[in-house]
Image (cartoon, helix red, strand yellow):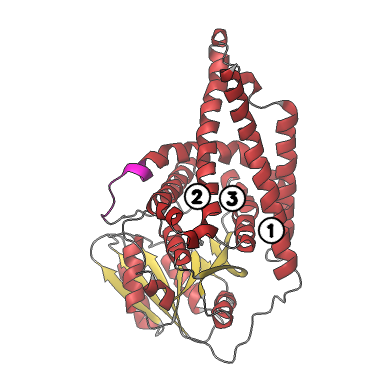
Amino acid sequence: MLTSTIFTFFINFLFYYPFAMSILWTLGALFFYFRREHNKSREAPIFDQYPFVSVLIPTHNEEISISSTILSILSSNYPNFEVIVVDDGSIDKTPAILEEMVDRYPKLRFLRLQENKGKPTALRYGTLASRGDIILTIDADAHLDADAIHWMVGHFLSGPRVGAVTGNPRVRNRTTLLAKIQVGEYSSIIGMIKRTQRILGKVLTVSGVIVAFRKQALLDVDLWDIDMITDDINITWKLEKRFWDIRYEPNALCWILVPESLSGLWKQRVRWAQGGGEVIRRHINIWKDWRQRRMWPVYLEYVTSVMWSYTYVTFLSLWILSFLFPFMNLHAMSLLPGWKGSLLVLISVIQFSVALYIDKRYEKGLFKYVFWVIWYPWVYWILTAFATVKATPTALFRKMGAPATWVSPDRGLS
């Protein structure tokens, strides 16, 4: 009887957790949209003064994409900025490309680290070398929208406690099923979560691919920790623990390349999962401080998502075993009851439709990707769950302190 009760509890957990979170993200995103986006002009804001912005590009072996990224930034409509590329021990043609470009573009500066020390280290050096009061960091494969800096700077001018503003990454490579699914994911998962968390008050993480910081806030938290595998999640928590405000600006567009192979996607999601686990491990002390109570729900939600991944992998394994060894009576055939599975599909379609409706403001023709995102649960739930199961033990038990070095990620097939 006890075993049956436990089994039923976890089966219900598998269903009700994503069902409840989907409803929360959808309602939160709609509230954010109608309150802060719907009637807002798409014209870039005009300021009485334009504070100097330092755009940092940490790079490692990016000879294919670095020049186009730099040119997209130099084409910005913002009048007062510099671009600093920090090359972190590249062994390809990246340094040669940068040296040639520095001679042609006065706004461009180039720092070279002889040894690969990791993205957080590159960001630290870039910040210390910067002249701006606002630091915008962007990945070496991304293309910055011409008005993105305007939209982000506006938050710093209006809010003295704004420590960071995270932008709106959009997928630009769409030649494969995996890439097309990620078009929907960045709208319906990443975009909706950012909107909802912003309404609730605390953001789990900025988007490392495009985020602007107040330099004063970065110095206040002693910049990035060099031993964290993901720079964006940890710096978000460090800022919020010091009560800096984190905002989301959907008009700050940035066009990115996403993995288009299963191996590339797997490596990316394992790294994300490990980074989340490391942050949960490092910042467990928030439970000792009542002032950090607004961070508690964010912490609990992440832990719950990890528990869900382990439960999903366990019961998926039981479901497979029930076919291979039916005599074991594993009861796993009830893993996906018909009506619950249908309801999850329905709520997923509603969530994706709402997300694409919201984001059509920033990108036309998104609704044609509804067909592709129906594959999301089958591709991404399984992959993300297994990635979390693999990465969490490493995150919780690996020895910290050494620089977290990096390799160039999968930039897609085209």
Image coordinates of residue 137 in percent, x first then y, are: 45, 69
Identify the secondary structure beneath mark 2: loop
Type of residue at label 1? Ala
Q: Which region shows up in magenta?
A: 394-402
Foreground disc of the pair 1, 2: 1
The residue sitting at 34% across, 61% down in the picture is 225
Where's the N terminus, which quadrant?
top right
* Residue 283 shows in the view: yes
Q: Which amino acid lies under the numbered mark 3 shown in the image of this protein? A: Gln
User: Closer to us: mark 1 or mark 3?
Assistant: 1
Give x and y (percent) for residue 31.
72, 61
**In this orientation, does residue 98 appear?**
no
Three-letter code, disc 2:
Pro
| Up/down of 33 relative to 129, above or below | above
Would you call the spot at circle 2 few (<14 residues within 10 Å), some (14-19), or many (20 or more)?
many
Q: Is residue 406 above or below residue 52?
A: above
Tell me which numbered mark, 1 or 2, is placed earlier along the sequence: 1
Query: In this figure, which residue is indicated by the disc labeled 1?
Result: 29
Q: Position of residue 197 (x, y in %)?
A: 60, 59
Residue 129 drawn above or below residue 36: below
Q: CA distance from mark 3 to mark 2?
A: 9 Å
Write down the quadrant of residue 86 in the picture.
Answer: bottom left
**Residue denoted by label 2:** 259
Residue 395: in magenta span: yes
The residue lying at 73 percent from left, 68 percent from top is: 35
Q: CA distance from mark 1 to mark 3?
A: 18 Å
Label 1's element? helix
Label 3 belongs to which residue? 182
